[in-house]
Structures are given as structure tokens and as C-alpha cells.
Amino acid sequence: MSLDISPAANLQRSLRQCLSTVAALLYDHGHVLEIITLPHRGLERGELKTLKTISSEWATCQQVLEISEAATYNGHGRFVLTAMGREIMFDMFGQGAADCA
């Protein structure tokens, strides 16, 4: 008996895995989740480069988040989660993780 998993289910699982990895890497390197969950904040390009250098997982997860439109760059050119990315982060880690108020 094989399980057929839909592309949507695979994407959802990949997004959740990447968001979990991103959260851990941010905490490990002195950041808080609000840096990517608040649309007016975000990670600057230099910070992204540092994270990519420190962890090969970061680059993969960043790519998955961007392709799936769970993350983008805000008006200041900083990497942030989209409304969908924040919603998934909220589902996974609670309101404090994705509170945009």
C-alpha cells in the first residue's frame, strides 16, 4: 500500500519544515522571530548572507519560502514573511511568533 501525497500537502510540509528551521537558525544566531514576521522589519541582505554562510539549510529554506510566496522582500529590501508565511508561523508557534499588531 503506497501513500499518494498531493503536491499541496508536500508544499505545506516543506513550508513548515523550512519555517521551523528558519526559526531555530534565527534564535541560534541572536535574532527573534519578529524580525521576519513583522512586515516593517526584516533581515537585511548582509544578515541573509551571513546566515547563508553559517548554514547551508538557510539558503534552501529561503528559496522554498520565496518560491512558495511565503516570504518576500519588503519596501526596504529586507526579507520578511508574507501574510501566508505569518499565518503558518502562527499555526506552528503561536500568536507571539507571528503577531503583527
Image (spheres, rainbow, N blue to C red):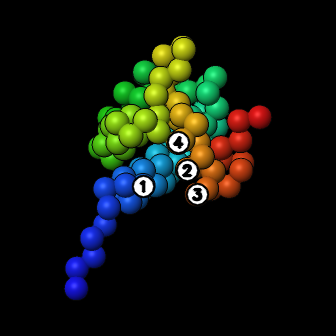
Give the class, few, some or many, for how many residues have Cα within 10 Å of label 2's Cα (few <14, many ≥20).
some
Q: Which residue is mark 1?
A: 12
Q: Which residue is mark 4?
A: 85
- Give whichever of 12, 36 is nearer the camera: 12
Q: Are marks 2 and 4 in contact (CB under 8 Å)?
A: yes
Give the class, few, some or many, for how many residues have Cα within 10 Å of label 3's Cα (few <14, many ≥20).
some
Pick whichever of labels 4 and 1 is earlier in the sequence: 1
Q: CA distance from mark 1 to mark 2?
A: 9 Å
Give the class, few, some or many, for how many residues have Cα within 10 Å of label 4's Cα (few <14, many ≥20).
many
**Observer able to see residue 2:** yes
What residue sits 39% from the left and 34% below the top? 66
Q: Are marks 3 and 1 in contact (CB under 8 Å)?
A: no
Q: Position of residue 98 (x, y in %)?
A: 65, 43
Q: CA distance from mark 2 to mark 4?
A: 5 Å
Judge whether 1 appears above or below 17 on screen.
Answer: below
> Which mark is drawn over residue 92?
3
Q: Amino acid at mark 4?
A: Gly
Q: Amino acid at mark 2?
A: Ile
Task: Give the foreground label among 3 and 1.
Answer: 1
